[in-house]
Image (spheres, rainbow, N blue to C red):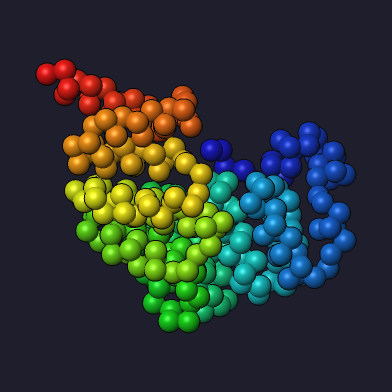
Amino acid sequence: MLRVTVLALLISSFGSPLAAAQRAVDPLIVNSEDPTELQQLAVQFIPTNQLGQALAALHKSVDLYPENAESRMWLGVVYTQLDDFDAGEAEFRTALQINPQLTETHNWFGVHWAQRGDLVRAVEHYRAALDDPAYPRISRARVLVNLGNVYVQLGDVEAAIPALSKATRATVSSNDPLYALMYVSLADALIKNGRPQEALGSLESLAVLPASPRGELLRGLAHRDLGSNEVAMDHLRQVLRLAPRSALAEQALEVMHQLQSSESR
């Protein structure tokens, strides 16, 4: 992605600078003079990818209260999503300088470094977050999933599995996206570690949710590794139905071709 400044983002979204000035900023942001309220508005804009609005709210929050560590942290999150890594890094560092006890900053700084491809630094910040004994249990589970997935990327599956297993011990609602993510991540690591039966056990926790392409692909891989080729093919076909023309579908097709080739020998 291109690096995007606030002005460039507003211009690209709304046309000329004049139009941006007149139309870009949400009235809730314009009318608020409360830095905490502005920060909360920004957090609501981020999940819907309204990053221009989030930046406007956070910059106004920081203008009103420069020592607001949480607003600085969220600025780091938004800049990271925009691939403006230098700006994101600066905001995370400022947040930690203002409040070294704001543990959530370490989680997001870890995400930042993972997105930049510096997985070693990502691990350092995830570990720093986990070192806080007062960090809430559900937040720890999120960090453990992030840490486990980075270990998988580093090729250290042995280290990934304990972190991901520990994450699944947290009580998480099945409606929370973290629920599926932690069981899928654990199953993926177990398959990579040659433990397909345990992977299927992890995937059983997804039975309360609708079938997902990722879950079906992992079930197919686990059954393949167990030698249950017909069952594996059924799950791989399900990937093609759920997510045609996707990267997961391409992977499923590749495995299906391998299974068909092995059977024809």
Would residue 109 be visible to someone looking at this image?
no
Looking at the image, which is closer to me, 50 or 240? 240
Name which residue lies at 34% across and 55% down.
202
149 over 143 or under it: above or below: above
Q: Is residue 239 above or below residue 30?
A: above
Q: Is residue 209 visible from the viewing direction of this image?
A: yes
Q: Quadrant of residue 264?
A: top left
| Horizontal arrangement in the rendering, residue 111 relative to residue 157 (left or right) | right
Q: Quadrant of residue 17?
A: top right
Residue at the extreme bottom: 134
**Is 170 located above or below residue 53 in the figure?**
below
Left or right placement of residue 171 versus residue 118 in this view: right
Classify residue 35 as left or right of residue 127.
Answer: right
Instruction: Tell which of 233 and 154 is nearer to you.
Output: 233
Relative image position of residue 233 (x, y in whole percent): 31, 29
The residue lying furthest to the top in this view is 264
Q: Quadrant of residue 40?
A: bottom right
Query: What residue lies at 46% left-to-right and 28% top-to-bottom?
Result: 241
Horizontal and vertical percent position of residue 187: 32, 51
Q: Quadrant of the C terminus?
A: top left
Q: Position of residue 158 (x, y in %)?
A: 22, 58
Count of labels in the image: 0
**Residue 227: percent from the left, percent from the top?**
18, 37
Q: Residue, x 50% and y 49% (percent of image)?
A: 209
Residue located at (62% from left, 59% from top): 75
